[in-house]
Structure formats: structure tokens, C-alpha cells
Amino acid sequence: MKYDRGEKIAALREKAMALPLLPGVYIMRDKAGKVIYVGKAKALKNRVSQYFGSPVGHSEKVRQMVAHVDKFDYILAGSEFEALVLECSLIKQYAPKYNILLKDDKGYHYIRVSPPPFSRISVALQKTEDGARYIGPYMSSYGIKQAVDEANKVSGLSTCSRTLAYGRKPPKTERPCLNYHIGQCCAPCTGKVTEAEYAERVQGAIDLLTRGSGEMMKMLTAEMEAAAERLDFEKAAKLRDRIAAIRRIDQKQKVVMSKVQKQDVIAMVRSGGYCCFEVFCFRNGALTDREEFITEELEAEAADRGEFLQWYYLSHRTVPPQITVDDLPEDAELLEQLLTKEAGRRVHIVRPQKGEQAALVDMCRQNAAQHLADRLGMGGRETAALQELMTLLGLPELPRRIESYDISHTAGEDAVAGMVVFENGKPKKSDYRRFTIKEAKGGDDPAAMTEVLTRRFAEYREHEGEAGFGTLPDLILLDGGEAQVQAVQPVLEAFDIDVPLFGLVKDGHHRTRAVALSGGELQVQSHRAAYSLVSALQEEVHRYAIGFHRQKRSKKISTTLTAIEGVGETRARELLRRFGSVKAVAASTEEELLTVKGMTRPAAKAIIAYFSEK
């Protein structure tokens, strides 16, 4: 008997519909009985039945998971919080394939000090028996790499590819590299320092790495003062320079600071079926570490955020007192309770709206967008703008393809429309289209929009699946306010097309002021990346539509003049260049017409006769 997947899904849905409306955990299993997904629910019946209903709105990963489900189990919990705790425990136990389980392959890092003389300090992923000294391990790759780089610069240690003269005196004839000239290397390759002097620098760098800049500053200041008292001014000056270098490094580190002394800032960007989570770790107000994790998207945004936070903090990370996020995860209050229990102190999950914290979140989101853009081959700036626009408009997915429409006419005459397409945040000019308004009355922009969108989606139904008109957009933007949106919405419903639809409202200076929707407006000026994107769209579609209108009107005017005997295309262009309009040509005298380049008296007389009969 042939296996009927449709019958299996129907049976699973029937079982799901019989579940109680109580909190609990559900466990999806494949044919072999292996757990492939674990989830929690406030009401098991509602949540589980969604998987086996209509696939519309499901991500690709959810569709794949459902296709492999052969049966499911469930466990009732006494509360939503108990369900959350149980879910975390089962995910740890089974490591299901379709949960967000990010491979933490960053591992440990060590500071490696090569054998003397002229030791080099670098970062190593593992210890080896090579005679070098290893300091560590350290969890933070970002922090330790930054620290080693700064310690090398402060101490003037060699980091270039030149081979140092181990066991012999370096040649003084060799020219030092650029690092020496910019004050970041003492040039041991040229013999400018002795082995003993270089060893002292190496030890200073190790002290800086192991003790920190505060302890080093105290120690170096004491040494400098002692050297000055001994009248050893040369050594005192060298120590003074090292103290100044450490101060410069400290100031550089304070470029990204937070008033909140201990927090993690986390942002998520989704695109192309993937999620990128970016984490900035602040300790003592300074950015000390950063990590990024990319996984396939599974659930809705809020659910993916919640699952990531569970994984990130319950696997091995220290939970800070504050977790600052770009948007709240699903069941944020329950997650706060869970993390508070894990940390043994109060933990807050906050979403800032403005100020320094909001700026840090924006920076974190931009980094996430850049990392995801690298994965998908998109531009980081465009991805960040699309992500911000998606959040602002409440879109179900990143609007990778946006269509924008504008109407152009002169007092209702010669009405036309332009359609521009932005793909991945950039213009796709091969998909631009022009429309001549045929039915709507002059000056009725909502009716003209209705006509244009009707023709556009009639083409879609005819060429569905093909490039151009056969491709549906992820977002439609109309130049105009609520009236245009309300006029066009029935067109989408008539064609059974579910695409988000908004209007673009201009201010008195013809600049984008707000995004219109049925029932109100959304202000966009405070959302810098999204504002720049919609402004670029509005300017581009306006340019395209008005360019077509001018071309059409110019052709009409030119046709009027070329209807006169003795006036061809060249003479018509010269007349319009000289007088600016057909009306001005008609009001000109014979002598004025003769001032036009290439004009003859018979042609001038013909022009006057033509308009005198009108």
C-alpha cells in the first residue's frame, strides 16, 4: 500500500485538535521515533494544530519539519513557566534537529609567547609542544585578539612577517618596516634594541595582558618616578611614553561605551530563510566581547528570539543583570523568571526606545545585518534598512522585492504611471514598467492607481512564475495617502493576492513624511535606515513617472507643431527651445518667428495662418 502523506497529516491534525487548552510541552518525532523538535505552548491544542493546518505562513524549515513528523507526544505542565523550564530541559536532553541549536565552535583561545630571544606574542587556538609559553585559556576570541594587538603596539613588539635574528646579532643595514615609522615596533630586525631591552618589552606586554591596564599604569608610574629620582631621565622618558601609549589605548576602547555597566546587547536580522543573532557584551561599561550566530529561521520572530536566548544563556554563558534587545522575545516575562533563577539574582530583558541604549541596539543590528549580508551576498546597509522597514511595518518577512507606483499628469491631462522595483534594497531597472492611463478621469489619482494595479495583477495571473510581471512583490508602496491605499486594497482582494500595501505621504517640500495605511499613518523620520530607503523609492518612482509624462507630453506638443506645413521635427524643436510652449509659439509675430534658427518666411506665415484658424 502506497504511503499517503496527506492522510498522515490529517490524522496528526485530528489528534492535535483533541489536545487540551492547557500549558505544556509537545515533542515531535520522526518515523524512527527520534525527537526532531520540542516546543512549549500556553494552549497545546491551538499551538500544535497550527503545524498540521494550512502551510501558508510557515517558514521553509517548519514545512520540512512537518514533512518528517510521524507522531508527537505531549506533557502537561502546571503553568507556562513550568512549560518553559521543561522545554529547556528536553532540548538539552534530545538536541532536536529543528530547534535552534547553534554549534558553538569558537572554543578556547590562548596567548602564545614564542621562545626567546625576540619573542613574539600572538593568539593560538590550542596548545602545542613547541617550546612556547601559553597563557590562558580564554573564552572570548574578540577580547583576547584585541588585547594581544594592543599589548604588541604599546610595547613596540614585532608583528610583521620578517624573520628575527634568533641567536645572532641582527644586521644594522636592514631598513625597518612601516610599523617602526608609525611608532608600533622597536625594529629588532635592524638591531635597534638589544635582546635584554626587547625581553623587557615582552615582559611588559605580558604584564599588561595578565594584570590589566590599571595595574600596569600604577607599576609604570612608580618605576618612572623612581627613575627620575635616580636622574635616569632616559629610562623615565621611555616609561612616560609607554604610559601615554596605554592611555591612548584606553581612550580608544572607550569609543563604544555604555552607562549600563554590565549588560549584553542582542539584535536579530532575518533574511533568505536565515537568522543572524549578534551579541555585544559590555562589562564595566566597555565593549569586551562580540559574537554572531547564524541559523535557519524556524518560527515567528518572537519565538526565534526566545529560543536563542534560552540556548545562549542556559548552555554555558554568564547571565548579566540586563539583556538589552532590539525586540522582545516570546514570553519575555517567563524568560526573565527563568534567567533570574539561573543567575541567582534579578535579570531584566529590556527593549530601549531612544537614547544611548537604542543607539547601541542599532549598532548591534547593523553588525548582524552585515554578517547575514556576507552569508547571502547582499549589502549590509541595505539589509539593515530592509530589516528596520520590516519591523516598522510589521511585515511577516524581509521585503526583498518592493514595487512602488506613482501617477503623473498636468492638470489631469496626459496621465501616466510609473512602477519601479527595488530588489534587496537596490533598484532593479530591468523590471521597471510604464503605464498610460486609459480609463480613469483626469486628476483622479486613486482611480488611476486602481487601474494601474488592476492591469499589473492581470498580467501576473497571465504570466505567473515568470520574471517581471510574473513575480509577486513582498511589499507595495503607493505614492499617496490613505485614499490611494483604500482604493487599491480591493484590487488585491479581487485577485486573491496577499501582499502588504502602504502609501508614501509627502510633506510641503515634496519629501517623505510618513507611511500611510488603511486607518492612519506611521512616522518614519526617526527610523533612519528605513526612512532613507522609502525616500529613495519615492524619489525614484517620481522621477521615473514624471520623466515618462514629460516624454509623452513633449511628443504630443511636437506632433501639434509638425502638423503645420513647412514645420518638421527639427524646426519644431527649435521653436519650443525658443518660445518654451505651443501657446507661446501661437502668440508670436512673424518677425519673432523669423528669429528662430532655420526658420523661413513661408514657414512663419504658415504657422501664423494655422493658429489664426484655431
Image (spheres, rainbow, N blue to C red):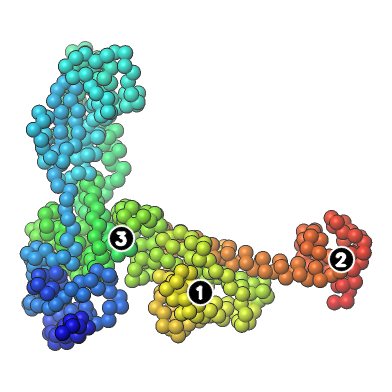
Q: Which one is in front in this view, the residue at disc 3 or the one at disc 1?
A: 3
Q: Quadrant of residue 397?
A: bottom left
- In contact (CB < 8 Å): disc 2 and disc 1: no
N-terminal of the pair, mark 3 or mark 1, is 3
| Location of residue 193 with respect to 341 vertically, above or below | above
Horizontal side, residue 504 vs residue 313: left or right: right
The residue that label 1 is drawn on is 481
The residue that label 3 is drawn on is 269
Residue 503 visible (yes or no): no
Label of residue 349 in the image: none
Q: Which one is in front in this view, the residue at disc 2 or the one at disc 1?
A: 2
- Mark 1: few/some/many CA within 10 Å (<14, 14-19, 20+): many
Label of residue 566 in the image: 2
Q: Secondary structure at mark 3?
A: strand
Q: Amino acid at mark 1?
A: Gly
The x and y percentages for residue 485 are: 48, 77
